[in-house]
Image (cartoon, rainbow, N blue to C red):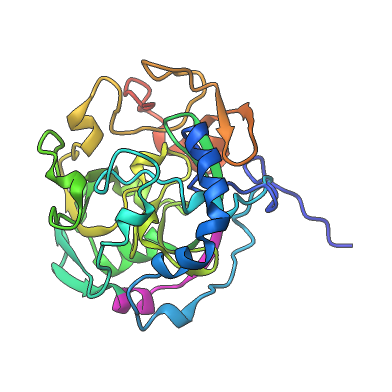
Amino acid sequence: MHIIRRRGWEIPEHLVTPEAIAMNRRSLIKGVGAAGLLLAGGRAAMANDPAPTDNLHPYARNAAYTVERELTPERITSRYNNFYEFGTTKNIWEEAQALKTRPWTIKVDGLVEQPFEIGIDDLITAMPREERIYRLRCVEAWGMTVPWSGFPMKAFLDRAKPLGSAKYIRIETFVDPRIAPGQRRIWYPWPYVEGLTIAEAANELAFLVTGIYGKPLPKQYGAPIRLALPWKYGFKSIKSIKRISFTQERPKSFWEVLQAAEYGFWANVNPEVAHPRWSQATEEVLGEGRRIPTQLFNGYGAYVADLYKGLEKERLWA
C-alpha cells in the first residue's frame, strides 16, 4: 500500500479558497448571488487577449505542492480581488478587463550578465510549467486556497543570470492611467513595486503565475504574469509584472512607501504579530463563513524559516 504522508503545511485539495470572496462579507454575499446571473456573460468578459500559449493549459499538477484545505471556488475568487490599479473595492473584475495583456513584454535589467526584454509568450514557452495548490493569506485577515499555474521563480533566475553582487529583486507592474483609473489617484506611489531578496526568490516556493484553475490567468488576478509567495501576506504577490530589476539596495515596496508603520519589506505571516489596526491570530476562509487559526509563515515554515536566521532584529512581519 502506498501511504501518503503530508507535511505540516499541506492541506486537502477540496479545501482551497478563491481570491474573490474574502474581505467584505456583504460584498461576498452580493458577489455570490450575482455570480449565477453573470456566469454566461462573465466568462466572455473575463477572457484574456488571445495568446499562442493559451493552449498549453492545463499544466500538469505538481503533487508536492498541495494543501489540506479545499480549493476556493472560482466563482468566489474571480469576483473578489485586490487590484488598486483599477479601484479600492474588491469588485473590480469588470474594470480590470480594460487591461491589454497582449502584446506584453517584461524588462529584465540591473545587475545581470545581460539586460534583456522578453515577450510573455516566449517566456512561458521557455519555462518548466506546472500547477501548484497554495494557500494565500491576505494582510486583511482572510485566506483562500487556489491552484496556480506557472513556473518556479528559480527557473527565471537561471534565465536572468544575476551577478553575484545582486542582493535584491525589485519588481514593478504596468503604468497606464488611461485604462487603470486607480493610477489617476496621484496620492498613490505608482507604479506598484515589490521586492524580495535573491535568496527568497530562489526558494522553491517562490512561483511566477500565468494561470489559475487550469486556464490562462484572467485579468483581475494580475494577468498575464504575477508572483505567488505563499508564506508572505498577499500584497507581496505583485500583479501584472512589467519589469524585474536586480540590485544591491533593498527596494521600498508600494505599501511601505505609502504607510511604513503598517507594511514592511518582509511581510511574513505571523499570527502573534498584530497589524496596528487588527489581530492576525485568525483568518476568515473565503466562501466558508468560518475563521481558523493563522499559522506562522502561513504554514510553510519548514520551507522558508531558514531564510530568516540571523535576521531576528529585522521587522520580519508586516
Q: Quadrant of the N terminus?
A: bottom right
Question: On screen, 271 above or below 247?
Answer: above
Report the number of discs: 0
Question: On screen, 25 above or below 104?
Answer: above
Q: Position of residue 38 (x, y in %)?
A: 50, 59
Question: On screen, 142 above or below 276?
Answer: below
**Residue stretch rendered in magenta on the structure:** 121-133
Seen at 52% across and 50% down, the residue is 34
Residue 297 visible at all? no
Residue furthest to the right in view is: 1
Question: On screen, 262 above or below 129?
Answer: above
Q: Position of residue 273 (x, y in %)?
A: 45, 18
Seen at 48% across and 29% down, the residue is 141
Q: Position of residue 240 (x, y in %)?
A: 29, 58
Closer to us: 76 or 58: 76
Q: Quadrant of residue 110?
A: bottom left
Q: Position of residue 159 (x, y in %)?
A: 29, 69
Seen at 41% across and 60% down, the residue is 209
Indicate left or right for 206 with 249 as reference. right
Residue 65 colored magenta? no
Closer to us: 291 or 253: 291
Residue 7 visible at all? yes
Q: Quadrant of residue 214?
A: bottom right
Q: Quadrant of the C terminus?
A: top left
Seen at 14% across and 44% down, the residue is 190
Residue 131 colored magenta? yes
Closer to us: 71 or 74: 74
